[in-house]
Amino acid sequence: MPLFYAPDIAVSNELPEEEAIHALRVLRMQKGDEMTLSDGLGNFHQAVVSDVTGKRCYVEVLSTSPQEPLWKGHLHLAVAPTKNIDRIEWLLEKVTEIGIDEISMLDCRYSERHVVKTERLEKILVSAMKQSLKARKPLLHDMLPFEQFVRQSYSGDRFIAHCYSEEELAAGEEGERSLSYCATDFRTALYDALQPGNDALVLIGPEGDFSIEEVRLALSLGFKSVSLGNSRLRTETAALVAAHLMNLIATR
């Protein structure tokens, strides 16, 4: 049975325009046909097409089934978008399929992209949510400057993945960075740092990494340095690894 996204189903029985077009023009659904709706908030709704008027599709909800979360705790990924937006679109699709609660965009010192249009990204999240048959859609935030973001209050565990050594962070100057994205030196592996059931926030920097000042600021505010392994990873790969590890630990 096809799955449709209807965020306002609690107050309106009309499908959103794009969902209506897909139902009527692509699937050629007619009055009386059954469908499943996701409100993106954790509920599946069994429904039937009750009326069709031009491009508009109206439904009647027959039953509602609240869905238990698929993982424990609240998982939040904050990442600096790459210059090539296609790579971030791919990332959002994959982390939604894997499972994440919240996604933030960071504007960092070395960021090559300072503007992100969230309207298209929201469509990707919806598509990925439907593809992976989830009842919850990740919350996507507009881009914030790094300092503003890390100074926000957060009650869960906070981690930052970066390429600096302990000596570089202590030296007071920005030296040559490690060859691996998160080489395992003084940092704890993210897999070991995460605690099942705890809320978790992981920061992933831009293609030029966080600046050393940004890392020091985050650490001074209570973030913990973590490793993602011994390989040098692209930004979107590092973010995907972090999301997967968070989800893996949270489903224990």
Image (cartoon, rainbow, N blue to C red):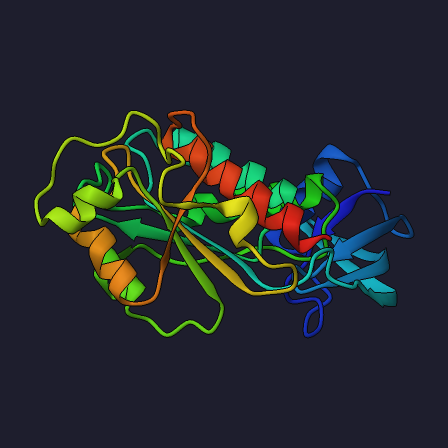
Residue at figure coordinates x 84%, y 64% from the top left: 60
Can residue 252 be seen from the camera position used here?
yes
Residue 78 on image: x %, y %: 40, 52
Name the image quarter holding residue 64. Answer: bottom right
Residue 13 on image: x %, y %: 73, 66
Residue 6 on image: x %, y %: 68, 58
Left or right, 73 with reference to 239:
right
Residue at figure coordinates x 21%, y 32% from the top left: 177
Can residue 211 be seen from the camera position used here?
no
Of 216 and 20, which appears nearest the observer? 216
Q: Work out whether 93 lies above or below 65.
A: above
Left or right, 86 with reference to 43:
left
Residue 82 on image: x %, y %: 32, 34
Q: Work out whether 16 lies above or below 112.
A: below
Residue at figure coordinates x 74%, y 43% from the top left: 23
Residue at figure coordinates x 66%, y 46% from the top left: 248
Quarter in which the N terminus is drawn: top right
